[in-house]
Amino acid sequence: MTPRQLLPFVDQAHAGGRSSMTCLYRCGNACSHPVPNDSGNEHFEQVVARAVSRRSVLRAGAVGAAAAGVLGTTGWGAVSPAAAAPSARAGAAGGGPLSRFTGIAPTAATTDELVVPDGFNWAPIISWGDPVTRQAPDFDFDDQSVEAQRNQAGYNCDFTALLLDGRGRGGRSGVLAFNNEYTNDELMFRGVAGSADLSDDQLRIVMAAHGMTIVEVRRERPGAPWSYQQGGRRNRRLHSETEFAVDGPASGHDALKTSADPTGTKVLGTLNNCAGGVTPWGTVLSGEENFNQYFDTTGALDPDLHLKRYGITSAGRGWERVDPRFSVATEPNEVNRFGWIVEVDPQDPTSTPVKHTALGRFKHEGATIRLADDGRAVAYMGDDERNDYIYKFISRKKHKPGNLKHNLTLLSEGDLYVAKFTGDGSDDGLYDGSGVWLPLVVNGTSHVSGWTVEEVLIWTRQAADLVGPTKMDRPEDVEANPVTGKVYAALTNNSARQPGQVDEANPRGPNKHGHVIEITERRNDAGALTFAWQLVLIAGDPTDPSTYFAGYDRNQVSPISCPDNVTFDKAGNLWISTDGMPGTLGFADGLYMLPLEGRERGKLKQFLSVPVGAECCGPVISGDERTVLVAVQHPGEVSGASPDNVVSNFPYLGDNQPRPGIVQVYRE
């Protein structure tokens, strides 16, 4: 791809590092509202802080480097070869050819280009509006319709899954599934400055652009670029009118019943789907995150403060104009039917996707599965909100390899826990400690005094407040390393945390740049109820002495901010995508690799950067390590941008409008 120009466009970032347009549509300006969690539970930063001041002595040698000041936008070249790592590190980070790339330099946030390392190229696989079904028309920006959008690829894409056919790592066909998290109304239509300007038809198009997209993909040979197949047998769009089943203990509860569904067992649509995971039995999980912003609360009553605790306090996105279920005053229980983990079988386009109430209801970033030693399925989950919690679900039944019918029931019943972290002080020179999974529901019994099982699962946030977990800094993707079994949680940032609220597990307040925590379950068994933990990354400008890169020399690493999604390669290296760097460091968001073992543990280097206004999401490392997939979400999402004032032309297909989509990066 030819390099793109630097665009003279400056956007005022909100407190969380995102542009004002992102904050409006991604999360309903969450950082501008009071933090929903006003419980007295301990902050993770308070756990970490007890060690930080004493540990700063160990960093005395970094003071001189810090005097250089805050990192500028032109002072970094490509990451140089590593100097000698700490002597405690033995061996070298393993990995295939992909891990040996030469890291790129940070990219200015105003660059309209997808930058990849030397020796690599990139190409789009599928973009917003591309036809999915046989009857779908080609995309026409100025001639959109509801029916077309229901058969075309959805809008902003986040979590991405590539499921190959057959058993080989180098398969030539498979299924690509990805979330369509939210829409940018003023980038989708001309003459629109906000949701209030949308016509009824445009509102329905916006609603249809949410959900998920599933398409078949093929390539000529292993390592060759993928192409999606229009009209593939397994192709499917899930949107605002798709029927979902509700299962688990809360299915049929009065709080889930509406005038359209008096049974409380089926829901139309899935909203604000963020991250997710692929189960060992081949299904896709998706988390309903910032669903609160779609509901108009005008005139709604909130005697039990359920709406307040879930941040459901706005006038919505105008959807109630065409569908009254999005008015809380009109249909008070509809909001309780969102905020769940969704499971979809990507191999069967006729199957009914399921919302699993056993996994609790909150702003689910996503869910990823690791099997316990006894075969039970364990789901790790983060509630992406300032000062909210990390959760774990353990299934009652055990996984049966090859038995899909049985395995599809694993997430329907089980035990739900929430994490409490304790720091162990600074004597070991590490940000670390121990933790316990506090029970919420076990063996079909509520462990929250005065609450039923169903109440715990529907209003999980308020139930968790009562048992004393640790407040975290926006826990997003939580995923187990397939090589070591250790679990890694991305904590993006927390503009609301104050200096007096820090702890060893959340060591900065405000936490502008975020961090990554490593959790080691007792005996490395996912079914354990106690764990050890350690921070492996405290993000930011490496010249800042408060940053930490698993003990590696900070002079030899890339700057990074706002870790969001994580994945792993076959050597167990951690790959991190970011969301918010333009507003915190002045650089484009991107994808990074962090070795976790050997002499190069902590040597962070950047693999790619995404275009102006975009966020890097849903990284997938192919099994043969020849290809990396990422979702390029909200390109050109800069305040003041419009179809007549275009900030990004990604994916540079000649139609002169930004179109979010999935891209592949491969060796030339």
Image (cartoon, rainbow, N blue to C red):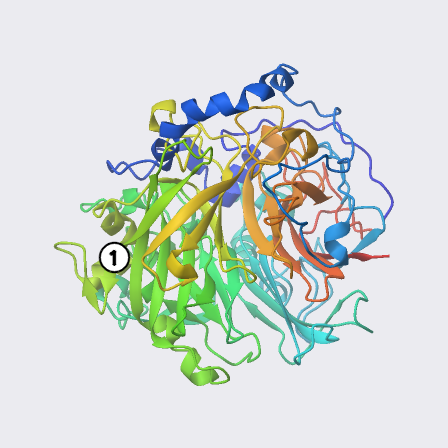
Occupied quadrant, residue 10: top right
Image quarter where the C terminus lies is bottom right
Question: Where residue 612 appears, x then y in whole percent?
Answer: 70, 38
Q: Is residue 589 found left or right of 460 in the rendered image?
A: right
Question: Is residue 266 placed above or below 587 in the rendered structure?
Answer: below
- SS for callout 1: strand
Q: Is residue 12 found left or right of 391 in the rendered image?
A: right
Q: Residue furthest left?
A: 450
Q: Is residue 349 found left or right of 216 in the rendered image?
A: left
Residue type indicated by callout 1 = Pro
Can residue 497 be seen in the rendering of this structure? no
The residue depicted at 37 percent of the width and 52 percent of the height is: 531
Please tell me how many numbered marks the rendered image carries: 1
Can residue 452 be seen in the rendering of this structure? yes
Question: Is residue 116 placed above or below 228 in the rendered structure?
Answer: above
Question: Where residue 579 appears, x then y in whole percent?
Answer: 58, 41
Label 1 crowding class (10 Å Cα cut-off): few <14, some 14-19, many 20+?
Answer: many
The residue depicted at 56 percent of the width and 50 percent of the height is: 565
| Nearest the eye: 209 or 270 | 270
| Nearest the eye: 319 or 622 | 622
Occupied quadrant, residue 529: bottom left
Question: Is residue 142 placed above or below 16 in the rendered structure?
Answer: below
Question: Where residue 537 appears, x then y in whole percent?
Answer: 54, 39
Q: Which residue is mark 1?
A: 439
Occupied quadrant, residue 508: top left
Question: Where residue 75 appears, x then y in whole percent?
Answer: 74, 24
Q: Is residue 120 found left or right of 490 in the rendered image?
A: right
